[in-house]
């Protein structure tokens, strides 16, 4: 059975459909949030943020006892309180959806880097599809890393490796949508390189997948394995 989308959050309300459809029709830049459920405010722009926050008035007008759909965060992003991509992506025209997908591909630079094509996405989740495109381009057991120059590089490398090797977001309790909304993630993906695992690392990887693959959350052994991989890269390239 297919796992819950990495970017999924909460359960959509009936009224959410009309709000999403309205925003998609009125403000294309604001609609960028519908790809993953979260976007940096400086990426979509101030006018788009005002559009999204203004759309929350619908919930007050209808006296709906639930959190408004769009929420500003202290990290400088705007987030959807409820986001089920399989539903949201069907609430407006497919042509616009593919345009929005392409925006995200261009923002992350994964079109040129891994040949990600929006119309050939494998999952109802943008970042799951991105990981699949990376594996198709460079192999099933790969990591995207660079020699560590600061703490952020370590975090970025470990986060992506946990996705690629174990299919698990949430390193350091950061949801996938929140992670990739940040500029640091964009810069890392654009500048890091893909590396193949060694034979002994592949053997250990299979052991971890067999033991913990049924769990949706990351385990300490999985995270420690990825950190050790990163330390090996540092010694060789640093």
Image (cartoon, rainbow, N blue to C red):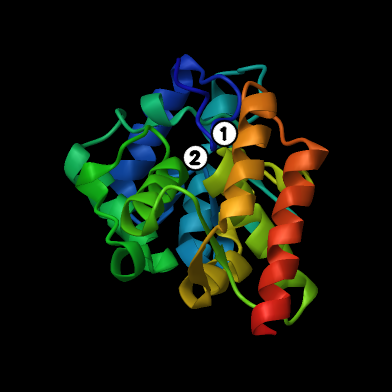
Q: Position of residue 89 (x, y in %)?
A: 33, 33
Number of labelled discs? 2
Q: Is residue 85 above or below residue 160?
A: above
Front tag of 2 and 1: 1
Q: Position of residue 97 (x, y in %)?
A: 27, 44
Kindly tell me whether residue 75 is visible in this rendering: no
Which residue is drawn at the image coordinates 73% and 78% (left, top)? 235
Secondary element at tag 1: loop
Which residue is drawn at the image coordinates 57% and 61% (left, top)? 41
For label 1, the residue is 69
Q: Quadrant of the C terminus?
A: bottom right
Give residue 204's quadrant in the image: top right
The foreground one among 66 and 205 is 205
The alpha-carbon separation of the residues under discs 2 and 1 comes to 8 Å
Side of 87 where 151 appears, left or right = right
Give residue 123's quadrant in the image: top left
Q: Label 1: few (<14), some or many (≥20) within 10 Å?
A: many
Which residue is drawn at the image coordinates 45% and 14% (left, top)? 1
Side of 163 where 215 appears, left or right = right
Give residue 175's quadrant in the image: top right
Kindly tell me whether residue 73 is visible in this rendering: yes
Side of 230 where 116 appears, left or right = left
Q: Position of residue 112 (x, y in %)?
A: 30, 70
Secondary element at tag 2: helix
Which mark identifies residue 55?
2
Q: Label 2: few (<14), some or many (≥20) within 10 Å?
A: some
First of labels 2, 1 by sequence position:
2
Q: Position of residue 10 (x, y in %)?
A: 61, 24
Verify CB contact (< 8 Å) between mark 2 and mark 1. Answer: yes
């Amino acid at each position: 059975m297919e796992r819950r989308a990495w970017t999924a959050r909460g359960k959509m309300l009936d009224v959410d459909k009309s709000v999403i459809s309205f925003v998609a029709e009125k403000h294309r830049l604001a609609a960028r949030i519908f790809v993953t459920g979260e976007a940096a405010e400086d990426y979509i722009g101030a006018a788009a943020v005002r559009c999204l926050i203004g759309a929350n008035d619908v919930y007050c007008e209808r006296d709906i006892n639930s959190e408004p759909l769009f929420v500003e965060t202290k990290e400088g992003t705007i987030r959807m309180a409820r986001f089920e991509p399989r539903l949201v992506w069907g609430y407006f025209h497919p042509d616009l959806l593919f345009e929005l997908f392409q925006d995200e591909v261009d923002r992350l630079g994964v079109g040129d880097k891994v040949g990600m094509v929006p119309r050939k996405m494998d999952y109802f989740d943008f970042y799951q599809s991105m990981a699949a495109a990376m594996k198709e381009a460079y192999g099933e057991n790969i990591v995207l890393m660079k020699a560590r120059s600061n703490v952020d590089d370590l975090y970025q490398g470990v986060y992506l490796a946990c996705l690629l090797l174990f299919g698990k977001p949430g390193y350091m309790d950061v949801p996938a949508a929140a992670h990739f909304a940040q500029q640091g993630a964009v810069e890392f993906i654009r500048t890091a390189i893909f590396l193949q695992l060694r034979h002994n690392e592949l053997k250990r990887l299979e052991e971890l997948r067999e033991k913990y693959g049924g769990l949706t959350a990351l385990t300490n052994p999985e995270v420690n394995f990825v950190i050790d991989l990163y330390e090996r890269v540092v010694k060789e390239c640093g």
